[in-house]
Structures are given as structure tokens and as C-alpha cells.
Image: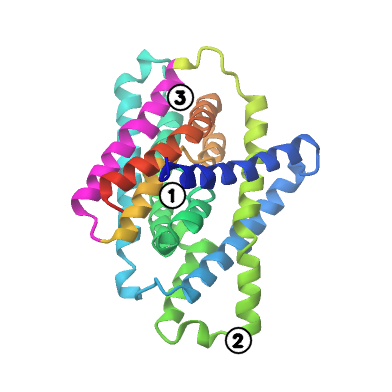
Amino acid sequence: MQTLWPVITSVLAVFLVMGIGAICRRQRWLTRQADHSLANLTAKVLLPAYFMHRILESPQFESAAAAWLPPVFGFGMTALGFAVAFTFARSLGRFIGLDSDAKQRAFALCAGICNYGYIPLPIAEESYPDAVIDLILHNVGVDLALWSIGIAIISGSSGGKWRQAFLSPPFLAVILASGLRQFGGSALVPAPILDAIGKLGSCAIPMGLLLSGAIIVDFLQESNWSGSRNVILAAIGIRQVLLPAVMLTIALAIVPSVDLKQVIMLQAAMPAAVFPIVLVRMYERDTETALRVVLSTSIAGLLFIPLWLVAGAWWLGV
């Protein structure tokens, strides 16, 4: 219990901020009209600032030459998730209600990728601070997998938008900050600018969590849960039982560093990501299936996140 309680409090704090976002939506303090501009502000200004400040100031960043391993694992673990979810949807999906191509692709995209941003980052800040830099670098690989393999799954073609990941502000911020670290790091950045970057970066996670809570409560109102039991159980079984066990086994076998093991442990504990719902809508696949996967795993995450973090720490010896 002494090991479990700090993890539970970290997880609850994250979900409480999301809950405040949901309350703000219900009270019309955070309107749908504001979502697009605030999401753009977060993705294109606040999050890049957070990444830059952490890389420039963190003693855990070793060198650009050593920074390739976390993205490789991020890409590989996400590709594994997509492969497992897509194979299941294609081979067994028709037996649980995934009886169309649109439903199967929506299920595979959403169940295949974990929430790799706004939930694991604050938990890492609180409980695994030495792993934050590896988590940021790991997420570069996750983004590349989403915009290549993920887009191929949801679109039904191999013409992914992987270039979009390379041109995204967070990715460019990681590259710029990593480059600066090779030539003096934060000493090259004037103190007022570095301070401004830090202040902007400190807003990224709270803003992202508030927006996530507001968007999730919208989805809860829109979703139809009738006849969804089998899809929900399959999503939880794949995303929060099977894939975590596989990821932790791989981490024990081949991951060299403690920090990267903690990153994979964090990712293994996560529910499905929220953003794929947007891609499902964009490509006109089955939104109901996407909502069921994301919402059910997010709610179940209140139980599974702390359990997997404690079990993973024991299994990996971290």
C-alpha cells in the first residue's frame, strides 16, 4: 500500500484536472467554439515550449547521439499496438459487433495507440522525474507511428501523412533544443527568453488536461452505449491487459536503461488516446466505435493505471 498510494494520488490529480475541464464545459465557461483555438495554442506554442524548456534545463539529457533510442521504442511499441489491434479487429471483430470495415479500422486505430501526452507527462513529472526527457523523445516516435501506420489503417491506403509529424511544432522544438544542448544548452538562450519559454511550458499540461476533460464530456453526451459491451471488453482487454503485459515483457528483455523502462511502464499503463477520434471523424469511419474504445479505456484507467504502474515497477525492478 505504501508503494501504491503515491501512484494513486498522482493519477487522481490528473483526472481531477480533467474533471474540472468537464465542469467548465458543463457550465459553459469553456465553450466548443474555443476548443480549436486553445488546442492550436497548446499544440503549437505551449507544448513546444514545455519540450524545449525541459530539454534545455534537464540534467538527464545526455546527448543528441544517445537520443535516438526512445523514439525507436516509441515507434516500435506503437506499431506493435496497431498490429495487435488491427489483427484482432480483422480476424475476430465480426463476432463482437465490429461487422464493417469502418468499425474495424476505427477500433484498430483507437485501441492500438495509448494516451502518450497529457496523462503520462504529469504522472512522470510527479513520480518519475528522471524519465521525463526520455518520455518526450519517446513520444516523437509515437507521433511518427500515428501519422504513418495509424493513417494507413484508418484511411485504408499506404499514403500516410508522416511528413506532418516531422513538421509539427513539438517535433521541431525537440530537434532545436537537442541541437542547442550540443553547443552550450540554456547558456546560449538569453535569460528572459528562457524564462518566458519556461512560463509558457508550465501551462501546457494543465491546458491540455482541461481541454481533454471538456472534449471527453462532449463525447459522453454524444455516444450510444447500447449493445457495446463486447467492444468495450475487447478494447479494455487489448489496450489495458494484453498490450501492457507484452510491453513490460519486452522492456524487461531488451530495454537497457532505467529511465526508458519507466517510460515504457508509463505507456503500458495508459488508456487509449483521445486524438484518434478526430482522425476517425476526418476519414468518415465509425465514430461510435472510436468513442466506445476511448471512453471505456479512459474510465477503466482509473483502476488500471495505478495497478500497472505498481506491477510494472515490481516486474522491471524500477
Residue 199 vertical position relative to residue 162 in the rendered view, above or below? below
Q: CA distance from mark 3 to mark 2?
A: 51 Å
Q: CA distance from mark 1 to mark 2?
A: 35 Å
Badge 1 element: helix
Return the disc, 1 or 2, that comes first in the chain's sequence. 1
Badge 3 element: helix
Residue drawn at point x = 61 percent, y = 51 percent: 208
Q: Amino acid at mark 1?
A: Trp
The disc placed on residue 245 is none
Q: Which residue is mark 3?
A: 103
Q: Amino acid at mark 2?
A: Pro
Measured from the top left, where is residue 311 in percent x and y?
Answer: 33, 40
Residue 13 vertical position relative to residue 198 in the rendered view, above or below? above
Residue 28 vertical position relative to residue 255 in the rendered view, above or below? above
Q: Nearer the viewer, mark 1 or mark 2?
A: 2
Q: Which residue is mark 2?
A: 190
Magenta span of residues: 230-256
Residue count near mark 1 (Cα–Cα under 10 Å), binned few <14, some 14–19, many ≥20: some
Quarter of the rendering containing residue 236? top left
Q: Amino acid at mark 3?
A: Lys
Measured from the top left, where is residue 297 in percent x and y?
Answer: 48, 31
The disc placed on residue 147 is 1
Main secondary structure of the magenta stretch: helix
| Of residues 316 and 161, the one drawn nearer to the viewer in this rendering | 316
Residue drawn at point x = 46 percent, y = 57 percent: 165
Residue, far left:
253
Examine the structure image and report whether residue 74 is included in the region drawn in magenta.
no
Quarter of the rendering containing residue 79? top left
Residue 157 in view: no
Q: CA distance from mark 1 to mark 3?
A: 20 Å
